[in-house]
Amino acid sequence: MPIQTNSILFTEVTKRTLKAQNVQSCEELDLRKLHQETNIKVNTLWRFFKEYRGERKSKTLTKLVRHFKIDAVEITNSISRRDIPTNLTETLKSVWDGTDAHARQIELLIKAVYAIRLDPLKDSRL
């Protein structure tokens, strides 16, 4: 799975896990219960929800996608087909000077912010 696909699937797994346990954050999850349902070790689940960001292939992600019966192709296609929000395109137009070099700088900046992003599903402070 490509990195973006992993990240999309991780977000969907997290949403479904929170919904299934009727909690607001990953800190509130009953990992023992999820372990009983999935046969994934509690410490592996803890590490997954605490540290995973979609940066690599994960057996835990694959097992949880199967557990929640998530159609990976459908989820990733539906997200990739979404239109870019108008406010984002307008902001880019307002700050971009029109050159390829500046476009590359903006691209790198967005990727850097993405790499260090805080996940509102994981961080209850947000």
Image (cartoon, helix red, strand yellow):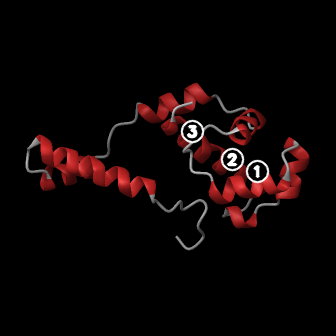
Question: Which labelled disc corresponds to residue 20?
Answer: 1
Q: Where does the N terminus fall, quadrant-wise?
A: top right
Residue at the spot of label 2: 16
Q: Is residue 82 left or right of residue 45?
A: left
For image coordinates 60% across by 70% down, the residue present is 124
Q: Marks 2 and 3: which is nearer the front?
A: 3
Q: Position of residue 79 (x, y in %)?
A: 47, 36
Counting from the top left corner in percent of width and height, residue 97 is at 8, 50
Q: Amino acid at mark 2?
A: Arg
Q: Nearer the viewer, residue 82 or 62?
A: 62
User: Relative to 5, is 29 above or below?
Assistant: below
Mark 3 or mark 1: name the one nearer the start of the chain.
Answer: 3
Q: Decide: marks 3, 1 in contact (CB < 8 A)?
A: no
Inter-mark Cα distance, 1 to 2 = 6 Å
Distance from Cα at disc 2 to Cα at disc 3: 15 Å
> In the rendered structure, are the residues bearing label 1 and label 2 in contact, judged by CB atoms less than 8 Å apart?
yes
Q: Residue at x 67, y 39 (%)?
A: 58
Location of residue 46 (image quadrant) = bottom right
Q: Position of residue 41 (x, y in %)?
A: 85, 50
- With respect to residue 124, does 84 lie above or below? above
